[in-house]
């Protein structure tokens, strides 16, 4: 009769989560930098030709992308803080499950 395999360590431990979060934050910062750079480009295009409707539309899209990347960074930091609080309290299973589901919803 086969036995049930029980993991000795959790598949996603605190160090792995921190590495994932750091990668998300780094990518988010790079996205924000590129979006703001592109925003400056389209703003310069609008200075030369104020009637360019496509440049206006793309200018707004760049600002939305910059704001979204900032929001992603804030969500990751919030999740890391919650993780630290849960680890300090000796978190129960319900809190841990909600934390992992929040991390899944971030991507």
Image: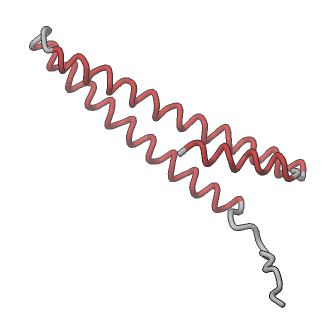
Please, which residue is most extreme toward the front here?
1
Q: Is residue 6 left or right of residue 24?
A: right
Image quadrant assignment for residue 76: top right
Q: How many marks?
A: 0
Image quadrant assignment for residue 7: bottom right
Above or below, 1 relative to 107? below
User: Which residue shows up at 19% across the image and 20% down it?
Assistant: 55
User: Which residue shows up at 51% across the image and 53% down it?
Assistant: 23
Q: Position of residue 35 (x, y in %)?
A: 33, 33
Q: Is residue 25 left or right of residue 44?
A: right
Please, which residue is most extreme toward the left here?
48
Please, which residue is most extreme toward the bottom here?
1
Q: Position of residue 107 (x, y in %)?
A: 53, 46
Q: Position of residue 81 (x, y in %)?
A: 72, 41
User: Which residue shows up at 89% across the image and 48% down it?
Assistant: 89
Image quadrant assignment for residue 73: top right
Above or below, 87 relative to 78? below
Q: Is residue 100 left or right of residue 29?
A: right
Q: Is residue 97 left or right of residue 50?
A: right
Above or below, 91 relative to 63? below
Q: Quadrant of the N terminus?
A: bottom right
In the foreground, 26 or 75 = 75
């Amino acid at each position: 009769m086969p036995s049930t395999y029980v993991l000795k360590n959790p598949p996603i431990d605190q160090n792995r989560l921190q590495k994932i979060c750091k990668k998300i934050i780094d990518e988010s910062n790079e996205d924000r930098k590129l979006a703001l750079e592109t925003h400056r480009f389209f703003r310069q295009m609008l200075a030369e030709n104020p009637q360019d409707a496509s440049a206006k539309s793309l200018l707004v899209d760049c600002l939305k992308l910059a704001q979204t990347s900032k929001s992603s960074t804030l969500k990751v930091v919030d999740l890391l803080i919650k993780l630290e609080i849960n680890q300090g309290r000796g978190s129960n299973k319900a809190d841990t499950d909600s934390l992992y589901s929040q991390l899944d919803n971030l991507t």
